[in-house]
Image (cartoon, grey):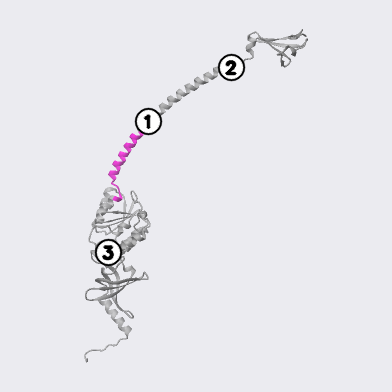
Amino acid sequence: MKDVVSVRFSVSDFVASLNQTLDFAYPYVEVEGELSNFRVSKNKWVYFDLKDEAASLKCFATVYALSGPLEDGMVVRVGGSPRLHPLYNFSFQAQSIQPVGEGALKRAADLLAAKLEKEGLFDPARKRSLPQVPRRIALITAGDSAAYADFVKIIHARWGGLQIMHYNVFVQGERAPGEIATALKQANEASEPPEVVVLVRGGGSAEDLAAWNDERVVRAVAASRTPTLVAIGHEVDTCLAELAADRRASTPSNAAEVLVSDRKEELRHLYTRRKWLDEHLAQILAQQRNELAVLAGRLDDELQHVAVVARQKQQTALQLLAAYDPRRPLRQGYALVRAGSQVVTRAAQLQSGSEVRIMFSDGEAMSQVKSIATKKGKK
């Protein structure tokens, strides 16, 4: 062929030239097809074929490109670029792999749910209580969304003065999982950390909500050091991020209602409680006064009884003292005779000429014994 200019390449130069052409023509493309021969090697490398009725494309990726477990037969959208490897021929280097269609998305979510359930990420025992009135709230959602507007409006209407730390993220699409996971990490590492992290978005199709079933997002929610509240605006299914959260709400508006009470309702409740406490306290005081009066009456009766018993005992003691008073016989005409320090009770204790002291009721007298007469005879 006379008009064709022959260009000679070495094998490696030719492969490099082809790759430059591919990089220029297809820097990033998305290809949809059915998964086949899907496998993960060493928990790091991912190999699979992407096929349709007429062709098959070998693909390669790292596990970081996965949004969750996949299996053969799923229809997926693979984002990446084609590459001719110097040794392993032509392949497609995938940067992201997303299931396509409700059937594939649901199956992928079911596979991931089973995996994470086995790891305990959805265990109710892991869930923490939300603060009663959080002063600082981290809000992760799209800033221009109705979800953001609804949440902020209701929060401020129900309880003003709360600080909202907004993290603006994509809530759907390929960028969403990475941005949501990063925002969660940033919220937990903030110099003034929030007391609760709230993630919200409105409703949508299964494909719109796919980010909230992404393994990166679910694990980030479960790993949050700060309690989490997730509200995805749909009622048919529950996203896995909601299962991993400490608390879920049905919609962004409901999330605001779950998070804080209505200030007016709280004031009414406090007024009712105060009124009840006042009435209850009055009842307690009245009951205590009645019980105190009864106790005082009992104490008075008991004191009177004790006084009567004491007087009776005193009277008995006085009577005993009077009965055993040594001066009583003296008043009756008897006398007490002492010889020295001894009391004379028998005539035999005396001798003629002994001096004795005779004690009477009104005094005493000294006397000398002249003679002694006993029952045995005179001394």
Closer to the camera in the image, 166 or 29 = 29
Q: Earlier in the sequence, mark 2 or mark 3?
A: 3
Q: Please tell me which residue is depicted at 60% across the width and 14% down the height of the picture.
A: 323
Q: Earlier in the sequence, mark 3 or mark 1?
A: 3
Compared with 327, 66 (above or below) is: below
List the residue tagged with mark 2: 320
The region drawn magenta spans 258-281
Few, some or many residues within 10 Å of mark 2 (<14, 14–19, 20+): few
Kindly give the residue lying farthest to the front in the view shown: 376
List the residue tagged with mark 3: 107
Closer to the camera in the image, 311 or 142 = 311
Q: In the rendered image, is residue 166 in sight?
A: no
Which amino acid is tagged 2?
Leu
Compared with 342, 259 (above or below) is: below
Contact between marks 2 and 3 (CB within 8 A): the answer is: no
**Residue 151 image offset from top left, x and y in percent:** 26, 53
Task: Assess whether residue 267 is covered by the magenta stretch.
Answer: yes
Which amino acid is tagged 1?
Gln
Q: Give the secondary structure at mark 3.
A: helix
**Residue 301 image offset from top left, x and y in percent:** 45, 23
